[in-house]
Amino acid sequence: MSSVRERLGGLGSPEASGMKRLVRLAAVVLGLLVLLVLLPTAMTYINPGHVGIVIHRVGGGVDPTPLSPGLHARNPLTTGIEEYPTFMQTLVLTRAGDRPGNDEINVNSVEGQPLSLDVSMSFELNPSLVPALYSTFRTDIATIQHTYVKQAIRQSLQEVVGNEEIAAIIGPKKAEVTGRVTRLLEDRLSGYGILVKQFTINELRAPPSVIEAINQKNVMQQQALTAQNELQKNQFQAQGDSIKAVGRAKAILAEAEAQAKANRLLSESITPTLVQYEMSKRWNGQMPQVSGSVMPMMQLQPTGK
């Protein structure tokens, strides 16, 4: 009994009380340390122009509603956050040059001629569809660009370019081809929340032999067009000369007809009486000074008194 009392009494001693306080302090410090470690992971900041994808570690599902930009609380033990950009981005696919890798797009024209293209596509992500995009591909947007999006661009180009002649693609139909490919990409990518803003064909490369043949064809067409224009010019000039000649002939005929008509009218209007009248108007009363056996006489009508 005495030993039990001694033990109970010891628990209430100053040394025991100090030990209890030390234990409580250690617990508080440990709790603060745990809180300091967990606090940064318990709060998530989503940058402007991004959304957060909430991944449930228990069950492996993805929350269909993304986190908007700003500060958000979460349980770091049961959820993970994947941040996706929603601002406008541009995917550039070009020949490697000095860079490692080669992203140019290779397709064939309707004649089977190979064609290499450098292209670029500007796009945005629909924020509400980002979780579904992540659920489909389970990777970051950069990887999606250089896998699925690149393949969609190549397929769309082949569908359009494969139905056109290479000379038309390089020349007058380049803008039309670009527009048709853009519409195909919009249809293919919009379902994943990838919104195409602009698609551009920056450069087209065909085999040198094809380029030479196209140039020769263009020269021949230009020469033929020049010859045709010269022929039309000569035809127009000949037609003009013919019209002028017809006009001159009509003018001469009209003038002759007018002169003949005038002469006829003049001859019909001259009578003996008119001749006598005109002579009387011009006679000065003197007899004509002429030689010969016949003297012209002028018959004057007597005047009445």
Image (cartoon, grey):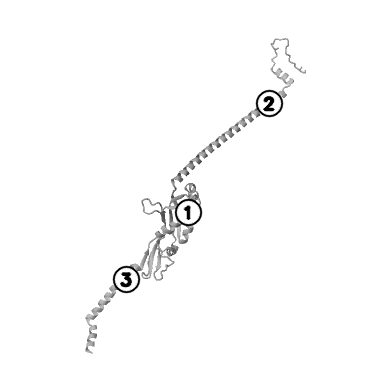
Task: Please tell me how crowded label 3 is: few (under 14), some (14-19), or many (20+) other residues with Cα within 10 Å.
Answer: few
Q: In which quarter of the image is residue 297?
A: top right
The residue to which callout 2 is attached is: 260
Of badges 2 and 1, the one in the foreground is 1
Quadrant showing the C terminus:
top right
**Along the line of sight, the residue nearer the viewer: 169 or 207:** 207
**Relative to 84, is 254 on the left or the right?**
right
Q: Is residue 114 visible?
A: yes
Q: Is mark 3 on a helix, strand or loop?
A: helix
- Which callout, 3 or 1, points at the residue further toward the start of the chain? 3
**Relative to 262, is 138 on the left or the right?**
left
Q: What residue type is labelled 1?
A: Gln
Task: Measure the C-alpha gap from mark 2 to mark 1.
Answer: 82 Å
Residue 235, label in figure: none
The residue to which callout 1 is attached is: 158
Q: Quadrant of residue 38?
A: bottom left
Mark 3 touches mark 1? (CB < 8 Å): no
Quadrant showing the N terminus:
bottom left
Q: What residue type is labelled 2?
A: Ala
Q: Is mark 2 on a helix, strand or loop?
A: helix
Q: In this view, does 273 lie above or below 193?
A: above
Task: Measure the C-alpha gap from mark 3 to mark 1.
Answer: 57 Å
Q: Where is residue 259 in the image (x, y as percent from the top left)?
A: 67, 26
Q: In which quarter of the image is residue 255?
A: top right
Task: Measure the C-alpha gap from mark 3 to mark 2.
Answer: 129 Å
Q: Where is residue 39 in the image (x, y as percent from the top left)?
A: 33, 69
The residue to which callout 3 is attached is: 35
Q: Can residue 196 be seen in this view?
A: no
- Which callout, 2 or 1, points at the residue further toward the start of the chain? 1
**Relative to 139, is 29 on the left or the right?**
left
**Along the line of sight, the residue nearer the viewer: 190 or 47:** 190
**Along the line of sight, the residue nearer the viewer: 259 or 30:** 30
